[in-house]
Amino acid sequence: MTDKILQTTDLTKQFGALTANDEISLSIDRGEIRGIIGPNGSGKTTFFNTVTGFYKPDGGSVHFDGKEVTGWKPYRLARRGLGRTFQIVSPFKNMTVRQNMLAVQTDDGRSREEKRNRAEEIMEFLEIDHIANNEARGMSGGQQKLLELGRVLMLDPELVMLDEPAAGVNPALESRIMDHIHELNRDGTTFVVIEHDMHVMKTLADSVSVFDSGSHITQGNFTDISQDDAVREAYLGGTTAEEDGVPI
Amino acid sequence: MSETTSVTNRIPGSRRYWYVGLGALMITWPIIFGNFWARIGVGALMWIGLAQSWNMIGGYAGYLDFGHGAYFGIGAFAAGIAMVQFGYPFVVGFALAIVVSIAISYLVAVPTLRLTGAYFAIATWAFAEAVKQAALITGITGGTFGLSLPRSPDTFIGVALPFQIGETFFYYAMLMLCMATMSLTYYLFERHEFGYRVKALRDDQDAAESLGIDTTRVKRQVYVLSCVVAAVFGSVHAWYIVYIHPNDVLATIITDRMVIMALLGGLGTLTGPVVGGLLVFLLQRLSSVFLGSTTFYLPLIGILIMITVLFAPSGIIGILRGEIDRNDVRQNVKDLGEKFNLL
């Protein structure tokens, strides 16, 4: 077992003349929570999409859990333990919460009964078991975020990539989501999180990677990053996170 | 309530009597009502089954297949060719319909399911037209002359049976096929994880892929399954009507009817195609029998489709379930009124 759960080397993705990801080399340690920040259009979501197989890279490589997985289809990566959520929450609206959970496909040899039990456990853990028979379209935005996280957990993932998990969520639910992420992390799950909310990033991330104009410009702990001149210029509008109201 | 609870325990007491009554009526239908109504029953059951087969790919998976009728014709000609050109009994033709429809639908699925929306609809429609034209110019299908199938007591399994192969026989054959189709749909699409995956890819294909679902494989499986069901009904229909012609069993209207039935009843629901299939078929048959018009039902269907699309997109089943929001209906009426300067 390697210490690096995810490693990208010179990962490049272009859309015509636009280089959305420009030779991004990044490695994520097993068991850490890595934050990714950067202005809109800096290539964060493209990076997620390229790593998880939704985009075919134009250059570079992706290694997951010690194995090269460049260009693998998303479902293969998911079954291998790389889970992700989307910026725009995407529950299967015409299905119940339980059916959403059971739709997840793994190839770990679990029986139907074991899978159903696992779904019940996860719904209980995320405190959405009381709405298990409700259709997903009737859920609030926050509950849909929890459902999305729950579905990913059905994969028993080694690494979870979350795209703005706190966006559009009320503070109480945001705190619940953060608690769940911390608890799962303590149990060994690695997280990579894109988030614009600096409070969340400070609370959550062990280290932060900063993207700008398709490049990975720096990496470090939250305090160092928030005082880095290049980061302040690119993302924080020339102020520090502290000046922006985030206590450091 | 647990997913594994038995079906009978889920049915409320008062409804159970209705289901038992309905089951008894269906079983005794040709005995009570005679040949004419048995014939109506054969048609109704066949169209319910066909609408359900289209509902699998069009409703549950969300792929608008406008070439589905081709498989009805392929099944009919597979049975016809086996019986007429090679002298085999019907059961061989029936098996051939299954094998041929699996092979053809898989070959069609590989390129066409890469497309979505209108592109998929056009590609499948073009495929159906190509099949029809090919059948018209090919000798083995009888070309423009069609095929006349034999229907003596020994043409079922190859040995003479002690009963007539008439309306009653075909009623029970269609009843069994229809019940098998309904049971398969219920189990696979409403209770099994396979159905959840199909609905998942319909709702959000990217999200489905990210959750370990091989959407390409699932789409192909649903497409092939739905086509085989249509072909099976086609093979029995061919033997039932005895004479088949490409312009009849490969007509575009066959697909159109399946789509209309599923849409009117409720897309992606178990009972929608039953309600829609019965309604459209009975409107058509009864208007021709009692009003003497074979086209009177068409404007009625047109009006019903407009009402459904505008006011009840979840179909008649949606209305019965109370899923239609009155405010939405009011808003739609208002929008229409403003559009046509009526308000």
Image (spheres, rainbow, N blue to C red):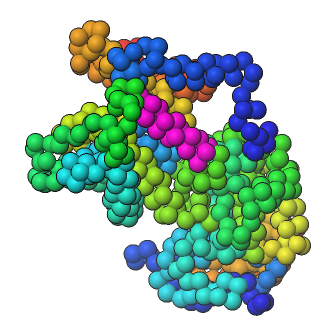
Quadrant of the frame with the C terminus of chain B: top left
Nearer the observer, B188 or A211: B188
Nearer the observer, B292 or B99: B99
Q: Position of residue B16 (x, y in %)?
A: 69, 23
The residue at the point 45 percent across, 59 percent down is B220
Q: Is residue A131 left or right of residue B172?
A: right
* Residue A135 lies in quadrant: top right
Nearer the observer, B166 or B7: B166
Nearer the observer, B85 or B205: B85
Q: Position of residue A164 (x, y in %)?
A: 69, 62
Quadrant of the frame with the N terminus of chain B: top right
Q: Position of residue B159 (x, y in %)?
A: 35, 44
The residue at the point 65 percent across, 63 percent down is A105
Q: Which residues are magenta?
A: B171-190
Q: Main secondary structure of the magenta part?
A: helix
The residue at the point 54 percent across, 88 percent down is A60
The answer to whether A156 is drawn above or below residue A62 in the figure is above
Residue B176 in magenta stretch: yes
Residue A81 in magenta stretch: no
The answer to whether B253 is drawn above or below residue A208 in the figure is above
Visible residue check, residue B233 = yes
Q: Is residue A112 left or right of residue B264?
A: right
Q: Is residue A10 left or right of residue A236?
A: left
* Residue A243 lies in quadrant: bottom right
Visible residue check, residue B48 = no
Q: Position of residue A147 (x, y in %)?
A: 73, 53
Q: Residue extending furthest top?
A: B291
